[in-house]
Structures are given as structure tokens and as C-alpha cells.
Image: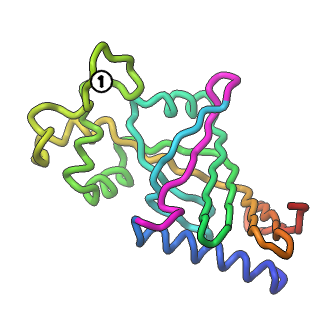
Amino acid sequence: MLKKEFKEIYEKVEKLMSEALKDSAHPYRTFSLATIDEKMPSLRTVVLRDFSLQENYFDCHSDLRSPKIKQLEKNNEFSALFYSSEKKIQLRFKGTVEIFHKNSITKQRWDSVTPSSKRCYMGPYNPSDMLEEYHPNIPENVQFKDPTDQDSLSGYNNFVIIRCHFYEIDFLKLMYSGHQRCKFIFNKEKINVSWIAP
């Protein structure tokens, strides 16, 4: 059982993340996801696609051919950063990822992806490939229109869900009177939480 002060923060985290799933303009809808590239950190902005505080995970989507997938296959640890300049609340998550590719979960999710977004996974080039000249990495036949279900099959073959299983949340609220910071550690069904210095 969490103390009242921590329970309020825990519920605030859940509320903010749930709101982000419903509102594309929410500051937490996009976040920074960090992986390890050999010995160097690698950082990029991704879109929040699912979240469960009870099951300790959140999702984003990616292209199977992306460098971050290769990085996560070598080292599945991640760090993620969410920040709202309006509410002045920062959330940092740590954990490990699971990659879903061509299974029942990705099939159901793919069916909910808009046709326009499906084009992003149909590119003729691998993400991050060096190019001799500019190319939008969208097939010419669908560059200015939505693909048919048949057209988008090639995109589904490249579509993956990155499921981030977190075991730690670092909560920070910036305040004039003094910043508020605490850390939640998830250990199976037990939650340990403590104040930490901002």
C-alpha cells in the first residue's frame, strides 16, 4: 500500500499517460527513447501507442529495418524521457524491451494504423540508409495517395511494436518553492517508492 503522498503521484502519472493516448497534441504523446549503440547512447523521438501502469509497459512502433531494432536486439535495455513544459513534470522510465513482429498483437495493431501512416513502413530504403539524393522513402505509387490493403502488405512485413517493460519511474515536478522528486521501483507485484534529492 502506497502512502497517500506517493499514491497521488502514482495516480497523476497514470492520468497523464492515459491522456496522452487520447490526445495527439499532449506533450507526452511523443517522447525520447534511448538505446545503446555499441558503447554510445542513441536517442530519438517516438510516438506513444499504448500504456499500462498496472502491467508496467508502454509501446511505440518502428520499422524492423531501423538501427534501433538492431541495437535493442543486442542490448534490450532502454531509457525513456517524457516532459511537459506546461505542467513542469518530467517522467523518466528504465527497463527492457520486447520486440513484436508479425504476430497476433502486431496484426491487430496494424489494422488500426491509418493507411497514410502505413506508407511509412513501405519505404524502399532501410531507415538511416545514406542516400545520394533526397528521397521521402515512400513508394512513388503511394506518395500522394493512401495505399490499398494489398499495397500495404509490404509495410506490415516491416512493422514492429517495441514494448517497453519498465521497472523504474523517476518522477520530477519543478516548483518555485522547491522541486519534488521521487522514484518508483517495480518488483513483480511490489512497488517500492522513496523521495530522492532533485
| Location of residue 129 in the rendering, given as x and y in whole percent from the top left corner | 38, 20
Whether residue 139 is visible to the viewer of this picture, yes or no, is yes
Q: Nearer the viewer, residue 137 or 163?
A: 137
Q: Quadrant of residue 123?
A: top left
Residue 173, compared with residue 37, is above or below; it is below
Q: Residue at x 32, y 36 (%)?
A: 158
Q: Quadrant of the N terminus?
A: bottom right
Looking at the figure, which quarter contains the C terminus? Answer: bottom right
188 inside magenta stretch:
no
- Mark 1: amino acid: Tyr
The image shows residue 9, relative to residue 145, as above or below, that is: below
* SS of the residue under disc 1: loop
Extent of the magenta region = 25-40
Left of 16 or right of it: where is 168? right
Frontmost residue, 177 versus 95: 177
Asked whether 33 falls inside the magenta stretch, the response is yes
Going 90% across and 61% down the picture, which residue do you hit?
Answer: 197
Is 169 placed left or right of 164 in the picture? right
Residue, disc 1? 125
Left or right: 7 in relation to 100:
right
Q: Whole-percent x and y of residue 135?
A: 25, 26
Q: Residue furthest bottom?
A: 4
Which residue is drawn at the image coordinates 81% and 86% (left, top)? Answer: 4
Q: Is residue 171 above or below residue 105?
A: below
Rendered view: 153 above or below 95: above
Instruction: Confirm whether residue 149 shows in the render.
Output: no
